[in-house]
Each structure stands twice: as structure tokens, then as C-alpha cells.
Amino acid sequence: MMIDLFIIKVGGNVIDNPALLQSFLEKFAAIPGKKILIHGGGKIATRIGDKLGIESKYVDGRRITDADTIDVVTMVYGGLVNKQLVAKLQSHGCNAIGLTGADANIIPAVKRPVKEIDYGFVGDVYTEKLHTGPLKALLDTGVTPVFAPLTHDGNGQILNTNADTIASSLAIALSEHYSVRLIYCFEKKGVLRDSADDNAVINLINKEIYQQLLAEKILTDGILPKLQNAFGAIDNGVKEVLIGHADDVLSNTTPKVAGTLIC
Amino acid sequence: MMIDLFIIKVGGNVIDNPALLQSFLEKFAAIPGKKILIHGGGKIATRIGDKLGIESKYVDGRRITDADTIDVVTMVYGGLVNKQLVAKLQSHGCNAIGLTGADANIIPAVKRPVKEIDYGFVGDVYTEKLHTGPLKALLDTGVTPVFAPLTHDGNGQILNTNADTIASSLAIALSEHYSVRLIYCFEKKGVLRDSADDNAVINLINKEIYQQLLAEKILTDGILPKLQNAFGAIDNGVKEVLIGHADDVLSNTTPKVAGTLIC
């Protein structure tokens, strides 16, 4: 089954770097057929929050989204970053439309329950409750959705949500209609066999190889959640997941791939 | 021909007033069938701009949109105001989707040429070049578009654009597919026969009555551009234009109307 939908998550390292972003958007725009972009926020939300006198709060290294912070990320992720990406993609001939999970109620979420830490206005996605109808209508009209990492609770509250999770949730929900390749762009060329050697990319990981890598303790703490997330997507219908550097993973959409392909 | 699309513009006086906004959104959500909302910005862009140390600049009473200001209005109109409206409408059972004119290239514009005044990043709409395909696909899926007053130039630049103009341009373009009532909410109950008497609403204005009113010099400077804009829309296929207070004009979508009906 040929891949007929590419869902690509790009993080702050690209958003914050104008040259890398420019090159990324050109390659993204050039991907033929149906595609969706999910972007992280980058450092600009912190910079604007600082200027507005809104302190970034962290507990155990995790950012807390209080009432002022959710307004800042709604402005910056949902407005500034998202609409600038849309306008830039339009200039590259890609008919982008900027969305959040609140739009067309595509990604309903629940405010994370307070246990040891109160994360504030952070949303956990109802993966099984996504509404893909309007999204499919847009994709079928030749439009390319671009998602900011925001959802909503259905009661009028915007929620800050992890962009990786939005990407995998969309990939899972849309696998009902399309054969999906989910692509995570990050700062490395892929999953590395040796974390000291940037070129020691493992090109293919299936469940058997994954078990071997776990047994050999080759996988670093940073990559483990990405692989768990990837296999979670595959277990729920996503055809394949590709992890690698933004410069490489969009260049070839043929079976031969740069980065690490998980299937 | 029955009205089958309502296009409603609401301004800063409603956006800035939580009680009025709440009541407005409830009434808007209750309108059956297809509808589009276009919102102005309100004072919050100025407030956030001030906090960020970005001075609001005016020439002859007209706001200038410099590079910093376009970023602020992209954040505030396209992000904060737009997405909060979407989340609130969702909570009232209205399946809203937040858009700018850059999204899906719906409203292409040109940066206003510099003559006596350089308005900066202000966009004049290419009314005849609107792309209504994706918009029609959304409306036909039961989704309600909510537009921020922003467009783009096709070369990657977001532009600040008058919300009244966006509303009339969308109404004209969509009149090809729908029988459209365009509604402008403002602070008065309608066009007044006596500007000192808030209840002296003229219920109906057609071209003949308009000529009479002009001859009698009854129309104030504030209302004239609105009427010119209204007749411009009607001359280009819009079925009817309704002008009145946000509290009244959404309550009855039957032939009997509050406010001033222009046709």
C-alpha cells in the first residue's frame, strides 16, 4: 500500500532557526500529494512572555501553563508562528491552512488532572474522539493543514498540548482513511547505534530489532519516548514512522529513506 | 429566494465587552444553518503592544501597521482573539473554525501602495480573486468559519485588513453559491433618521430611499461609508445587508428584522 498522507512534526529547533526553517518549508511544500504539518512553539513564546512580564514557571523541569501563559501560547503558537508558517507556505505554492485542535473541534482534550503536579492549562488528547471529517474535506480539496500545539476542552478553554502527541493522534485517526507515514523531525539524523557517532544511524527498526536494542541498552533516554510513541502509532494503524533530521527526511518520499524508519 | 448564508461582522465594542460578547456568541451560535463570523480586533492589540513597548502610530487619525505592529496583530487578532472565540463558540455547540485570509489562500490582498501616507503592512483585498472552494467545503460540512481581520500578499507577508471589507468581500464572493444576508453589528440600533434619537431607526433603505436621505442630508459622516459599502455589496450580488446593534440583529432571522435592512 502506497503512502498517501504524510504527517510531519517539526520542533522548536527548526522554528527558531530562519535558515533551517526556510529550507524545511521549501522541502515540505515540494512533497507531492496530501500532507499535514504540526509545529512546536520554539523559544519565541518565552521571549514574548518575558517581555510581557509573565514568568515561565517550571516544576521538576516541566513547564507549567498558568492562565497568563495559556494566553501567551495561544497568541504565539496559534497566531504568530502558525500564521507566519501559513503565509510562507503559501508563497512556496503550498495551499496551507492554519489550525489548532479547537478549530472544527478536530482535537478534543481534557485538562490534565492535578496529581502531584498541577500542570495548569495542559490538555491530554482524547485520541479516540478526534473529528477528522472537516480535516478530510480540506485534504480532499487539496489544502494542507498546519497545526499549532493547542487543543480545547469543549467548555471554552484552550489547552497547551504536546506537538508530538498531536502528530501521533492525527496520524492514528487519519489511518482510517489514508496510508500514513508519520515523520518526526529532530536534531539528530535518526536513532543512533552509538550516541557519540552522529552518522551511526539505524535505518530500520521493527519490533524484533527494538527488543534487541532494548536488551543491548543501546537506546538513550532521549530517544526512548519517541520510539514508544512511534510503536504506539503503528499499533494503532499508522503505516510507518520516520525519525530524522529536518534536512534529510523530507527529501525522499520514496521507499529509500534517510533517517530511521519504524514499522 | 430564502437566505441560506449569514455573514456577520462584529467589532471591537463587542469583543472588548465580556457580557456583550457572551450574549452575542450565544445568539450567533443559535442561528440555524450556514454562517460566517468576521471579528475586529478591539483594544487588546493596543494594550499588548503597549506592554511589549511597541508604540501605536497614527497619521491623520489612521493607524500605521509597521513591522512590529503586524506581528502584534497577527498574534492578537489571529491567535488570542480568534482562537478564544472559536473555543467559546465550540462550548455553545457551534462547530467554529478560526481563519485568516492567508489560510487556504481564501483572501489574497495587495500591500496598500504608498501615496501621501505609508500605512505599512495594510492589505487591500483582491475582491475578485477570493478562493471560496475550501470555504464552501467547510460550510457544506457544517463548519462555521470565524475570520480575523488579516490577509496576505502571496509572498509570505501577513497584512492587516479592515474587517468590514473582509466581510463584504466574502459576502460578494459567496453570493455565487448562496443567497447571502450580510450583517454589520455596531453600537447603534440601525441607521437613524435623527442622530439624537437612538430609537429613530430607519427600518428599510433601498436605492430610492437612499437618494432621498442623501438629499435631505439626514445621514451622518459615520454611517455613510457603511451604506456605501452595503450598496457596493448589493450591486455585486449580495441579497441584503442588515445594520444594527449586536443585541438585536441576530435574534430574528425571519423577514421581520430589527435594525436597518438594505436591499
Image (cartoon, coloured by chain):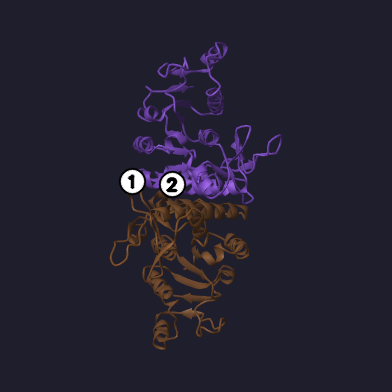
Chain colours: A purple, B brown
State which quadrant residue A247 falls in.
Answer: top left
B208 vs B249, left or right, is left
The residue wearing badge 2 is A97
- 1 or 2: mark nearer the eye: 1
- Residue A103, given in percent of the width and then of the height, sits at 53, 48
Q: Which residue is most to the right?
A: A115
Q: Are marks 1 and 2 in contact (CB under 8 Å)?
A: no
Q: Quick one: label 1, few (<14), some, or many (20+) residues within 10 Å?
A: many
Which type of secondary structure does the marked residue at label 2 adopt?
A: strand
On the question of residue A10 being in view, the answer is no
Badge 1 amino acid: Ser
Q: Is residue B204 above or below residue B183?
A: below
- Tell which of A53 and B121 is nearer to you: A53
Residue A91, label in figure: 1
Q: Both on one chain, marks 1 and 2? A: yes
Q: Chain letter of disc 1? A: A
Q: How many marks?
A: 2
B228 above or below B5? below
Q: Inspect the image, locate mark 2, and give the three-letter code of the amino acid beneath it.
A: Ile
